[in-house]
Image: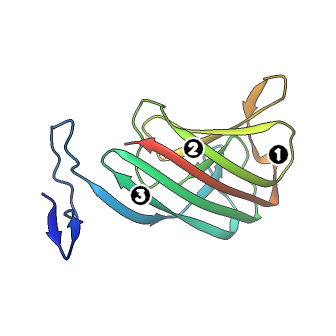
Amino acid sequence: IPSMTGGAVGFPATQVASAGANDLDDYEEGTWTMGISFGGASVGVTYGDQGGVYTKIGRQVTLTGELSLTAKGTSVGAARITGLPFTTVTDRFSAVAMRLASVTYTGRPQAYPLDVDTVLSLEKYTEAGTQSVLDETNLTNTSDFIILASHFV
């Protein structure tokens, strides 16, 4: 149950869930560590900048983060942003905006949270609309990601 202290509404450290559709029963702010994997592994990956912040209001999480590589390592396969602070639900009504630098492909990037997971899948689309995964061949040892995402938990 929220409490009023010094003009602020305070929520308990552990959520006290409510079944009421219109009850705000959780609020949280925090930090998270953004990472990257290729094919589910991160062998030899090193980072310059790596981190982010989030705000959780009810079941919606909005987060920002930055990740800059100093070495992309030796893992291969589909690239994924790892370390989301909360596990997503199965509905993909989510938005991700990204800024990428030092990547090697043409077209536009796209990301979405995987169902019931703590990762974002990364894809690329050509101007003709062809979709494929973003993988280790598209990144360099100095690739940089800045993201803004909003999803449900």
Which residue is disc 3 drawn over?
55
Viewer-proximal residue among 71 and 75: 71
Q: What residue type is disc 1 on?
A: Thr
Question: Where is residue 129, by image quadrant?
Answer: top right
Q: Earlier in the sequence, mark 3 or mark 1?
A: 3
Q: Residue at x 45, y 59 (%)?
A: 54
Expressed as whole percent of the image width and height from the top left, the position of residue 63 reads 50, 55
Gap in Å between the C-alphas at discs 3 and 1? 33 Å
Question: Where is residue 65, by image quadrant?
Answer: bottom right
Expressed as whole percent of the image width and height from the top left, the position of residue 101 reads 80, 56
Q: Nearer the viewer, mark 2 or mark 1?
A: 2
Question: Where is residue 131, by image quadrant?
Answer: top right
Q: Judging from the image, what secondary structure is the residue with disc 3 in?
A: strand
Q: What residue type is disc 3 on?
A: Thr
Q: Residue at x 46, y 34 (%)?
A: 115
Which residue is disc 2 drawn over?
120
Q: What residue type is disc 2 on?
A: Leu
Gap in Å between the C-alphas at discs 3 and 2? 17 Å
Q: Is residue 131 left or right of residue 150?
A: right
Q: Is residue 11 left or right of residue 74?
A: left
Viewer-proximal residue among 81 and 4: 4
Q: Residue at x 47, y 47 (%)?
A: 118
Disc marking residue 137: 1
Q: Residue at x 30, y 47 (%)?
A: 58
Q: Earlier in the sequence, mark 3 or mark 2?
A: 3
Q: Is residue 97 left or right of residue 14?
A: right
